[in-house]
Image: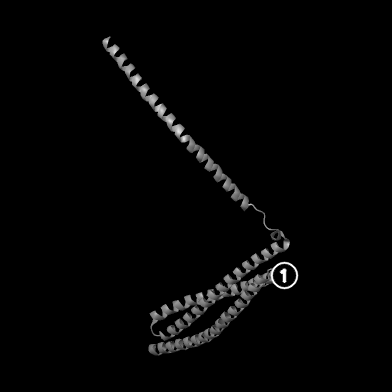
Amino acid sequence: MAWYGQLVIRSLSFINCFGKKYSKRILEMKHICEWSRPLMKTSLLFTVVHCSCASNKDNVLLQTPAAHKLTSEYMISQSCASTVSGAQHLLTLTLAAITDTTKCYRECMNQLMVLMDQSLDAQGNPELVSELWDEVVAMRIKVGDCKRKLQELSSFMEYVDKLATSAAETAFMGGAEHMSTVLCETINSAHAKLASEYEETKALEKSFLKHQEIFVSRACELEKEMNKRHETGTC
């Protein structure tokens, strides 16, 4: 039983020591809470001030617009300006597409004329002639695609031109005179650019047709000569 008595004495001493340390820890935490209480009040004060500033800012943003901006005339003028801006953007994009297509169309026609001349000069070399003829056929297809795309864009441009003209007239009647004037200048500039592109393209098309006629006639002559030589050689 002696060992049991020693165990009880050690347990009581441990509890006494732990109780003193625990009481000391409680006093330290109480002191920290009392010291930090003014800081908590200060932070709450700053939070309240910040929220009041945000509400003031929201009040400024929620101000009603000026009286003249609520009139029918002003809103019609703004709508006309937006319509003119959209029509001008569409006109500019369509003009750029037509310009790029006409350039591609002319380049393809020039390349095709060069290939036709090379195929005629390569007579007597069957392998080279066959290779060049494949390139001629491929380029003919590309020329046809460019021409078809140009025709579609030209037809679309007619509707865009009508839309832009109507938008300019409507904007002038709706009170957006400046936007109407700007759109009219854009339309006139587009007409001048299109006329120049179409004129250059038509001139090249005429040259291409003449070159194609010469190519067909020369190709027929060369084929007849080769047939005669072949017949003479067999005889």
Q: Which color scheme is applied? A: one colour
Residue drawn at x 45%, y 83% as measured from the top left: 114
Q: In the displayed orientation, state which residue is furthest to the top.
A: 1
The residue drawn where x is 44% and y is 79% is 133
Q: From the viewer's perspective, is 71 left or right of 143?
A: right
Q: Is residue 73 left or right of residue 42?
A: right
Residue 3 left/right relative to 34: left
Q: Nearer the viewer, residue 49 or 55?
A: 49
Residue neighbourhood size for the residue with mark 1, other residues' Cα within 10 Å, grouped as few (<14), some (14–19), many (≥20): some
Residue 147 position within the rendered picture, expressed as x and y whole percent measured from the top left: 55, 76
- Closest to the observer, 23 or 70: 23
Mark 1 element type: helix
Please indicate whether residue 184 sits to the left or right of residue 222 in the image: right
Quarter of the figure that contains the N terminus: top left
Q: Position of residue 156 (x, y in %)?
A: 62, 71
Residue occupying the point 27% across, 12% down: 3
Residue 202 in the image: state x and y as whole percent. Answer: 57, 83
Return the residue found at the far left: 2
Residue carrying label 1: 173
Vertical order, 105 against 20 (above or below)? below
Figure check: 97 above or below 72: below
The residue shown at (72%, 70%) is: 173
Amino acid identity at mark 1: Met
Q: Locate residue 48, reporting x and y percent.
A: 55, 42
Could you say which is closer to the camera, residue 106 or residue 92? 92
Name the image quarter holding residue 174: bottom right
